[in-house]
């Protein structure tokens, strides 16, 4: 059973957004949601019963003007959003994730993840982390790794905490949605390949991030980040033209009503354009792919309060709406 949707008091920027919705008994379908919370079934409006949001993104330069026209046409039939269930806005083929991309977040994690035998006071380890971030910034070295599409779940769905996850944590993130293939694109042209933005909560089990048995190989992102449902996504894809500056958005995550993360994307070390460009130097980015841009300070490992059964997370990013998910412990025999 899922929690109730996030309150309607978190609007999105611009006249419309993309979503994937369904009726109680019907299949998911691509929808245009207007700022007045009206829903247009894009299968009917665009005359294709097999249409998905991914199909729209694969033809984004041609589709965007048609979506603008539909949103502005008052004669197009709209149904109330309240009649539908909201799913993750799309199922991506590839997920690119950014680590260590918020300065204060990295400093906090460096202090919280004390290595065995490291008895230095917190202020020394904090200063070490600050110097590391300054060096990464000067050397222009983003950190990108790969996530699994199977971890994606809806913005109001329950999140199952695996029995083996000893330290599940939240990580609210801005996610860029690719709308044009990108391979070896420059920073200057990178945002031309971004169709829009959405919200991601990139859950992480802190206990399995580092391979203590094999420290030489470093991090284990497969186990720590990719359990089914560990990436609540959405509710909307808001077109980039409506978002404005992705480098000046406010991210807020509340746990059971208490604010845990409250930061601006201004604290990102590498901006969206740099992240997209960097990922494209090694990999071919495809329409519908996600580029997660890292999480700000305020995670549970730093606060000493990790996720447990019954917790409710409310995440919002300015102009992108809000999501609400409840944590449910995995049933064990």
Image (tube, grey):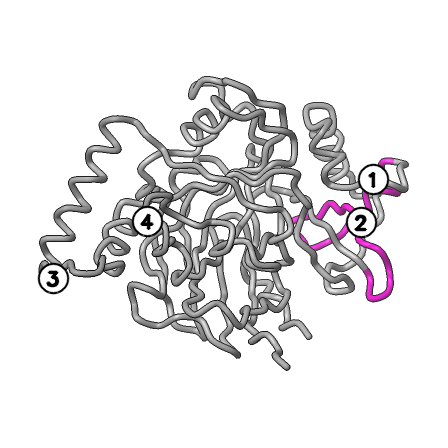
Q: Residues within 10 Å of mark 3 (few under 14, many from 20)?
A: few
Q: Are marks 1 and 3 in contact (CB under 8 Å)?
A: no
Q: Residues within 10 Å of mark 2 (few under 14, many from 20)?
A: many
Q: Are marks 4 and 1 in contact (CB under 8 Å)?
A: no
Q: Is residue 79 left or right of residue 36?
A: right
* Labels 3 and 4: the sequence-earlier one: 3
Q: Is residue 114 above or below residue 144?
A: below
Between 17 and 273, the one nearer to me in the picture: 273
Residue 199's x, y, as percent? 53, 50
* Labels 4 and 2: the sequence-earlier one: 2
Q: Are marks 2 and 1 in contact (CB under 8 Å)?
A: yes
Q: Is residue 127 left or right of residue 206?
A: left
Which disc is residue 215 wearing? 4
Residue placed under numbered mark 1 in the picture: 51
Residue 309's x, y, as percent? 51, 78
Residue at the image position 50 percent from the left and 55 percent from the top: 223
The answer for how far apart the CA atoms under marks 1 and 3 are is 57 Å
Which disc is residue 291 wearing? none
Residue at the image position 61 percent from the left and 38 percent from the top: 94
* Part of the protein shown in magenta: 23-46
Quadrant for the C terminus in the image:
bottom right
Residue 32's x, y, as percent? 73, 45
* Labels 1 and 3: the sequence-earlier one: 1
Residue placed under numbered mark 2 in the picture: 29
Q: Tell me the quarter of the picture where residue 204 sits.
A: bottom left
Q: Nearer the viewer, mark 1 or mark 3?
A: 3
Residue placed under numbered mark 3 in the picture: 119
Q: Nearer the viewer, mark 4 or mark 2?
A: 4
């Amino acid at each position: 059973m899922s929690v109730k949707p996030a309150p309607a008091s978190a609007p999105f920027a611009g006249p419309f957004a993309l979503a994937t919705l369904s009726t109680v008994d019907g299949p998911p379908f691509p929808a245009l949601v207007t700022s007045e919370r009206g829903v247009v079934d894009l299968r009917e409006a665009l005359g294709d019963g097999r249409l998905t949001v991914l199909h729209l993104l694969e033809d984004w330069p041609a589709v965007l003007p048609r979506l603008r026209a539909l949103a502005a046409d008052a004669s197009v039939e709209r149904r109330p959003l309240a009649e539908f269930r909201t799913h993750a806005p799309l199922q991506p083929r590839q997920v690119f994730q950014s680590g260590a991309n918020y300065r204060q977040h990295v400093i906090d994690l460096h202090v919280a993840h004390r290595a065995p035998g490291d008895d230095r006071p917190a202020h020394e380890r904090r200063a070490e982390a600050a110097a590391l971030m300054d060096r990464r910034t000067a050397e222009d070295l983003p950190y990108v790794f790969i996530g699994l599409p199977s971890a994606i779940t809806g913005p109001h769905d329950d999140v199952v905490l695996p029995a083996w996850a000893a330290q599940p944590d939240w990580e609210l993130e801005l996610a860029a949605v690719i709308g044009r293939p990108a391979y070896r694109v420059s920073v200057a042209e990178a945002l031309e390949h971004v169709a829009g933005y959405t919200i991601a909560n990139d859950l992480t089990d802190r206990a399995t991030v580092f391979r203590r048995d094999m420290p030489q190989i470093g991090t284990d992102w497969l186990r720590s980040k990719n359990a089914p449902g560990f990436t609540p996504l959405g509710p909307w894809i808001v077109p980039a033209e409506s978002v404005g500056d992705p480098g000046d958005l406010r991210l807020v995550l509340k746990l059971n009503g208490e604010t845990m993360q409250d930061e601006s994307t201004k604290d990102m070390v590498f901006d969206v354009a740099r992240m997209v460009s960097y990922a494209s130097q090694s990999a071919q980015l495809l329409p519908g792919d996600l580029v997660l841009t890292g999480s700000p300070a305020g995670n549970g490992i730093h606060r000493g309060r990790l996720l447990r059964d019954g917790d409710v997370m409310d995440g919002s990013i300015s102009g992108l709406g809000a999501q609400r998910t409840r944590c449910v412990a995995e049933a064990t025999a």
